[in-house]
């Protein structure tokens, strides 16, 4: 295929994927005519399961993305941050999938009543990636109507978009599938090479890529690089998130969050649900 024609095809695919994963432009959901408090789509609950009420605390604070770490143990997908915290009663299905399915049913097809944009469920694989993903895929199939789905080149939006992070070996079985109910969490090294229909999200460690932590002025070279990263991802229909950003309440965190918003970073990472909620409400 000629280079120009191929570029047009790829650009069209990125635009189509972005349109599916983002709220419909010009719709009642995009212009504010909706039911209930407006969700904070750019708020990401890091290690959400460590809050007193996993999932529900984040939803009460109107977050648009929640993170769950999973371990494959004796065929079960358990939620924990480390092996010594494993509890057989804390499963991905029990803490997240079943409650989300019930909520979507009660809200007539969406996580937030009247808002059709999907909630992002970032699933961080802590055990061997390939086998854990296959177990996850089998579980997601039981909730097939809940999730955004990739099927033979087409992305169909659902109430929840599952994104697989963590152990990189998950990429192998994911890439081989013609039908998926999850997308891949790429890294900056993947930027410009992975399609949004596979890697819907690009995430990386802030401290390994930038020196600024919110004190003083943001170096102009770093601001330029940040905006180039976001622009490149968005041109391909992908979203951007950084972890390991400062999370101690104060002017430095606010300064960094302000720069992330200005650059168009899609998800702000926090353990402080109320703090990010207040910040985003103040920066509408």
Image: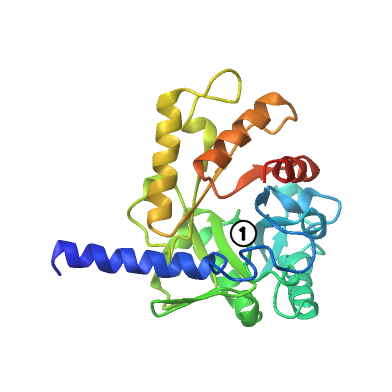
Picture coordinates of residue 174, whole percent (x, y) = 45, 68
Q: Quarter-wise, where is residue 143 in the image?
A: bottom right
Please state if 16 lies on the left or on the right of 66 as rendered. left
Q: Answer few, some or many: residues within 10 Å of disc 1's Cα (few below 14, many 20 plus, some between 14 and 19).
A: many
Residue occupying image coordinates x 33% and y 52%: 192
* Quadrant of the image containing the N terminus: bottom left
Picture coordinates of residue 187, whole percent (x, y) = 45, 48
Residue occupying image coordinates x 82% and y 55%: 57
Please state if 40 lies on the left or on the right of 242 as rendered. right
Picture coordinates of residue 281, whole percent (x, y) = 73, 46
Please state if 25 lies on the left or on the right of 172 as rendered. right
Query: Most extreme residue toward the left, as rendered?
Result: 2
Picture coordinates of residue 217, whole percent (x, y) = 54, 20
Note whether 31 is above or below 278 in the view shown: below
Residue occupying image coordinates x 66% and y 50%: 44
Asked which secondary structure carries label 1, the reply is strand
Residue occupying image coordinates x 63% and y 29%: 255
Label 1 sits on residue = 123
Query: Most extreme residue toward the top, as rendered?
Result: 216
């Amino acid at each position: 295929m000629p280079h120009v024609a191929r570029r047009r095809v790829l650009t069209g695919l990125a635009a189509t994927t972005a349109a599916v994963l983002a709220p419909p432009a010009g719709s009642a959901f995009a212009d504010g005519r909706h039911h209930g408090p407006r969700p904070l789509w750019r708020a990401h609950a890091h290690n959400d399961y460590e809050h007193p009420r996993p999932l529900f605390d984040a939803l009460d604070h109107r977050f648009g993305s929640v993170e769950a770490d999973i371990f494959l143990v004796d065929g079960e997908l358990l939620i924990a941050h480390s092996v010594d915290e494993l509890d057989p009663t804390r499963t991905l299905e029990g803490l997240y999938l079943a409650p989300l399915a019930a909520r979507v049913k009660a809200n007539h097809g969406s996580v937030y009543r009247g808002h059709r944009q999907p909630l992002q469920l970032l699933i961080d694989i802590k055990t061997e990636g390939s086998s854990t993903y296959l177990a996850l895929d089998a579980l997601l199939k039981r909730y097939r109507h809940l999730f955004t789905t990739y099927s033979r080149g087409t992305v169909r939006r659902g109430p929840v978009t599952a994104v697989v992070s963590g152990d990189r070996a998950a990429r192998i079985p994911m890439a081989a599938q013609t039908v998926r109910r999850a997308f891949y969490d790429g890294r900056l090294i993947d930027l410009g090479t992975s399609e949004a229909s596979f890697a819907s999200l690009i995430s990386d460690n802030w401290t390994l890529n930038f020196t600024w932590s919110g004190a003083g002025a943001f170096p102009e070279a770093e601001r330029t690089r940040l905006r180039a990263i976001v622009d490149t991802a968005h041109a391909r229909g992908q979203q951007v998130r950084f972890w390991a950003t400062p999370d101690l309440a104060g002017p430095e965190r606010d300064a960094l969050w302000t720069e992330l918003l200005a650059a168009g970073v899609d998800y702000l990472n926090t353990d402080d649900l109320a703090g990010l909620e207040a910040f985003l409400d103040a920066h509408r």
